Image: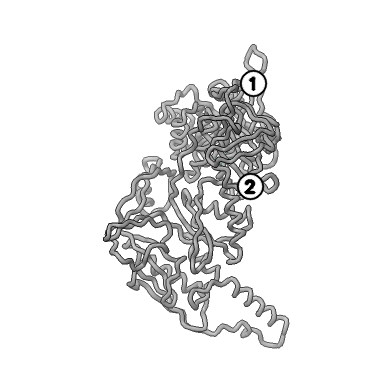
Amino acid sequence: FPSEKIRNFSIIAHIDHGKSTLADRLMELTGTIKKGHGQPQYLDKLQVERERGITVKAQTATMFYENKVEDQEASGYLLNLIDTPGHVDFSYEVSRSLSACQGALLVVDAAQGVQAQTVANFYLAFEANLTIVPVINKIDQPTADPERVKAQLKSMFDLNTDDVLLVSAKTGLGLEHVLPAVIERIPPPPGISDSPLRMLLFDSFFNEYKGVICYVSVVDGMLSKGDKVSFAASGQSYEVLDVGIMHPELTSTGVLLTGQVGYIVTGMRTTKEARIGDTIYRTKTTVEPLPGFKPVRHMVFSGVYPADGSDFEALSHAIEKLTCNDASVSVAKETSTALGMGFRCGFLGLLHMDVFHQRLEQEYGTQVISTIPTVPYTFEYSDGSKLQVQNPAALPSNPKYRVTASWEPTVIATIILPSEYVGAVINLCSDRRGYASFDYEDAEYQASDLVKLDILLNGQAVDALATIVHKQKAYRVGKELVEKLKNYIERQMFEVMIQAAIGSKIIARDTISAMRKNVLAKCYGGDITRKKKLLEKQKEGKKRMKRVGSVDIPHEAFQQILKVS
Ligand code: GDP
Ligand code: MG
C-alpha cells in the first residue's frame, strides 16, 4: 500500500454519543469483524469497559476497504481507525491517538447536540491540525433534531453544514457515506517513504506470551521483521521479533510501510523501556526525534497498598504491567506505618483512579487498599521554605516553623447545558454533585486555608488516615472519620480512644469500650469440629489485621473508611 492509499483517523465524541458503536459498524462494513459478532462495542475489550459501558482505552483497528467511485475502477484502501474514550479523565488517550492520525470523525448525538467533551475533543483535533469530518449520529431517535445540531456545529466550530453526515450507527442509515468521506476529505499520511525509518511509539501493553507490545505509527521509511531498531529516549536497541497490524486482533504482516499504524514486538525486558511518545529509528542511523507528547499533569494522588500485607511483590508486578498500558499514571514507592509498603500514584481524575484500581483487581487479581485521594498542595513556612505535598502524611503535624500560606490547585471548568437549568446547576455545583457535561483544564494554584487533619488511635497518629482539608471543613470531616472508625473497629481487650486532631489540638473524639471477645461464646454444646472451625476463622481474621500501636484494625475497616463518599 503506497501512502496515498492509507487513511488514519480517530473517532472522537462526547461520552455515549456512539463512537464505539460506529466503530463496530465500520469494521463490519469492511469485513474486519463479522456482522452480529454478538458483542457490541467490540473494541471495548477490558472488563471495566464492559461493566461500566465506557471506553477507557483508545483502540486501533486496521481495515481494508474497496472504494467505488462512479465511472472508475474500485480501488483498495488501508484504513486505520482509532476509537477513543470520551470522558475528560482520559483525554490524554485521545490526544495521543490523534498524533497517529490525519483526520477525525467528530460524532455528535442528534438529540443531545454538542456537549462539553464534543468541544474539548474538537479543539484537541483542531490543534493537532486534523481534518474534521462531522457526523451526526442517532438520527433514528424520535427526539433527534439534526438541523439544530448542524446549526450548533456551524456556530461553535465554523463547520460547513453541507459537510455534515447524518447517520444511525444503530440502524445503519447513512453509513455508506462515512468511509468515502474519510477517503475524499482526509489527506493521506505525509511521510517520506525513502527517508530513514522514523516511528512514533504511541501506546503499549503487556502480553503474557509476547512481552511488551508497542503500538507504532510509521512516520517515514519502512520496517521489516528482523530489523534492528533503537529508541531515542531510552537509548535501548532491539531486534524486531514480530511486526504487524491490529486487524483488529494482532496479525503479523512482516512489514510496516510509511504512514501505517501497527505493532512491533521486541525482546524488551521491562515495561519501563517503552516510553510513550518516544521516537523509534533504525539502529546506526541519525534522525530528528519526533515532538512526542506533552507531559501529563496529575490532578489526584492516592496511596495504593496490597490488601494483604505479603502481596507487595505481586502488586509491584501488576502495577508495572498495567502502567505499560496506561502511561498517564505516575508511580513512586511509599511506606506507611499502618499499611506497610505500597505506592503513591498520581491520576488524571477520580474516575481514572477508580478504573486503575478496578483494572488491578480484574486484570491482575490484586486486591488493593487505596488511601484518601488528595490533590497536590503547597505550604509555605515562616522561614520562607516551601513544601509540595502529594501525601498528607508527609506534612508535619507540628512543624518547626509556622505555616504562613497554603495553596491548592484549581481548574477552569466548562459546563454546557440548556439555559433553563442554569439556576439548578449552580446549586448542584456548589454542592459538588455532578450534572450536565463537564470539562476542565489546569489553572493556577490559589491561596487557600488548608490544615492537616490527623487521626489518632490511643494517642498514635495513623499515617494512612491523614488528610489535608480546608480549615472550615476540618471539624465536620474529623467528626465523620471518628464515627466511621468507631463503627468499623471491633472492640479490643482494652479501651480504644479515637481522636481527630489539627496539630496538637483535638477537634473530635470518641472511645470504643473494652470487651473480651470470645468467639466460642455462641458455641454451647460440645461440637469440637465447629469450635475448631471458629478458632481457625479467628486466626484467619487476625492475619487480615493491621496493628497500629496496640490497636488491631481489620483491612476491611481501612477499605470502608477510605472509600470516597
Ligand atoms: P461511546 O461512548 O461514544 O463509545 O458510545 P457507545 O458506542 O458506547 O454507545 C452509547 C449508547 O448509544 C449505546 O447504548 C448504543 O447502543 C447507543 N447508540 C449508538 N449509536 C446509536 C444510534 O445510532 N441510535 C441509537 N438509538 N442508539 C445508538
Ligand atoms: Mg466508546
Task: For mark 1, give the secondary structure.
Answer: strand
Q: Residue 288 location, x and y as percent?
A: 51, 30
Is residue 91 in view?
Answer: yes
Q: Earlier in the sequence, mark 1 or mark 2?
A: 1
**Image-quadrant location for residue 23:** top right
Look at mark 2 in the image and give the residue it sits on.
269
What residue is rendered at 69% in x and 44% in y?
A: 210
Q: Residue 302 location, x and y as percent?
A: 47, 57
What residue is rendered at 55% in x and 68% in y?
A: 555
Residue in front for this viewpoint, 142 or 82: 82
Colouring scheme, one of rainbow, by chain, secondary structure, one colour = one colour
Is residue 29 in view?
Answer: no
Determine crowd level at label 1: few under 14, some 14-19, many 20+ residues with C-alpha closer than 10 A: some
**Image-quadrant location for residue 500:** bottom left
Task: For mark 2, give the secondary structure.
Answer: loop
Q: Residue 190 location, x and y as percent?
A: 54, 23
User: Type of residue at label 2?
Assistant: Arg
Q: Nearer the viewer, mark 1 or mark 2?
A: 2
548 w.r.t. 424: above or below? below
504 w.r.t. 319: above or below? below
